Image (tube, rainbow, N blue to C red):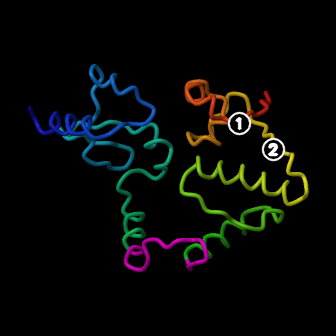
Amino acid sequence: MNSADDFIRRDLAAIWHPCTQMHDHETVPLLPIARGQGAWLIDMDGRRYLDAISSWWTNLFGHAEPRIAAAIAAQAQTLEQVIFAGFTHAPAVELAERLLALAPPSLARVFYADNGSSAVEVALKMSFHYWRNQGHGERRRFIALSGGYHGETLGALAVSDTGLYREAYAPLLFERLLAP
């Protein structure tokens, strides 16, 4: 058994992969990726694969981009992370100001989320709280676009219209209206 085969065996013994029927890996093996470079993924045996999905839509600038790696390393020397409830820091304020300079005047604040599903959850909560604070707590219905996908958290799934992801969790999801 080579090191890639051993690595795959270890993976399957320890990890549940998202959006995957795990039994499929009995016939369709995992690709053991060792590194990335630009738009390419390189496996443990040196084969290259074009990352045409940008590692799930999040890697817009390619893998191992030197300027991004340098910026991350520089920031890690100062502050890696701090809880944002009751605290702030210069990079957050500076980025918010830059984003607001690009936004229409009616958008006066920035809320940071670390992924799309969380951003959708926050938007749903903000909408709920807005109407409740206006004295309309009964306004709890959401409209979603037909065929839309917004993430895998329960709120994001509730306003999605992708059967593959929704069906298993339908009993847990709130009702939404669909627009064409």
**Picture coordinates of residue 167, whole percent (x, y):** 59, 25
Q: Is residue 76 magenta?
A: yes
Q: Residues within 10 Å of mark 1 (few under 14, many from 20)?
A: some
**Most frequent secondary structure within the magenta stretch:** loop
Amino acid carrying label 2: it is Arg
- Residue 99 percent coordinates (x, y): 67, 66
- Quarter location, residue 30: top left
Q: Mark 2 vs mark 1: which is more N-terminal?
A: 2
Which quarter of the rendered picture does the N terminus lie within?
Answer: top left
Q: Quadrant of residue 31?
A: top left
Q: Which residues are magenta?
A: 74-90
Determine which residue is flagged by label 1.
Answer: 174
**138 over 178 or under it: above or below:** below
Q: In this rendering, would 84 be left or right of 50?
A: right
Q: Position of residue 127 (x, y in %)?
A: 78, 52
What amino acid is labelled 1 in the image? Phe
Q: From what the image shows, is residue 68 above or below residue 43?
A: below
Q: Residue at x 52, y 71 (%)?
A: 83
Q: Do callouts 2 and 1 mark residues in contact (Cβ within 8 Å)?
A: yes
Q: Residue at x 58, y 78 (%)?
A: 87
Name the residue beneath numbered marker 2.
140
> Helix, strand or loop at disc 2?
loop
Give whichever of 151, 167 is nearer the camera: 167
**Residue 101: x %, y % from top left:** 72, 69
Kind of element beneath mark 1: loop
